Image (cartoon, helix red, strand yellow):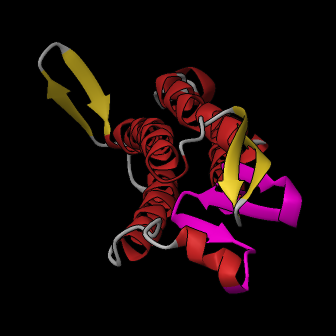
Amino acid sequence: MGSFRVWLFRGLVIVAAGLLLFSWFMPWWRAFIATINGQVQIHPWGLKHNLIGPDAAYMAGTEMPAFFAPLMWTYLGICIALLLFSLLVKEKTFNLGKFKLSLPKVLIGGVGLSYIVVVVLAVIIAAIRTGDFYGTPLIGVTYVAFNDVGTAVEAGLLFGYWLACGVGPLLIVLALLRNKIIGKAKLSA
């Protein structure tokens, strides 16, 4: 029974890692510009748009610093590596004050906590940057001057963002429930 429970837990962590990857590759925010059928999307690693020619000039200055995308892709790689490592590492426990923690719990919970921080920072930075460059709210419809014509811009958080909001807490819950799911090791006689 213990072996099944271990593999069940590993499967749950792999599913959570898959959800993390799925949310990572999906856009988290989109602004749709009605008059030109243009879209601006924010992903965890940066901004993408389908504007061409003179319309693309409106995107000048919206880029993240050059180090940002490689940093975020490195972060993703480290998170996935830590989750996979947590499945293979031996049960090593250590004390942190009154708390007795195992290395796999710390790795899984740490990735979950860090992903929550990324999700919160992403929405804060997106709200600041969209307000600074376009005067548009993060969510809702606003009218802006685009190509000297007033146009509606519909902006909103997408499914990828909401999925990312759930992945961090899911990993923390898995870390907290690890011993319950795996069960205690039976002592051999």
Magenta run includes residue 146: no
115 vs 7, left or right, is left
Query: Residue, x 67% and y 33% (percent of image)?
Result: 139
> Which quadrant of the structure image shows residue 181?
top right
Q: Position of residue 20 (x, y in %)?
A: 63, 51
Magenta run includes residue 28: yes
The quarter of the image holding the N terminus is: top right
Question: In this view of the protein, can residue 157 be seen by the observer?
Answer: no
> Which quadrant of the structure image shows residue 67?
bottom left
Closest to the observer, 168 or 120: 120
Q: Position of residue 125 (x, y in %)?
A: 42, 45
Q: Is residue 151 above or below residue 95?
A: below
Which residue is farthest front?
A: 148
Query: Residue, x 60% and y 33% (percent of image)?
Result: 165
Closest to the observer, 144 or 109: 144
123 vs 149, left or right, is left
61 vs 11, left or right, is left
Question: In this view of the protein, can residue 142 be seen by the observer?
Answer: yes
> Which quadrant of the structure image shows residue 106?
top left
Which residue is farthest left?
A: 97
Q: Position of residue 91 (x, y in %)?
A: 37, 43
Q: Position of residue 74 (x, y in %)?
A: 40, 71
Q: Total label count? A: 0
Which residue is farthest bottom?
A: 53
Query: Residue, x 41% and y 67% (percent of image)?
Result: 64
Q: Which residues are magenta?
A: 24-53
Closest to the observer, 62 or 105: 62
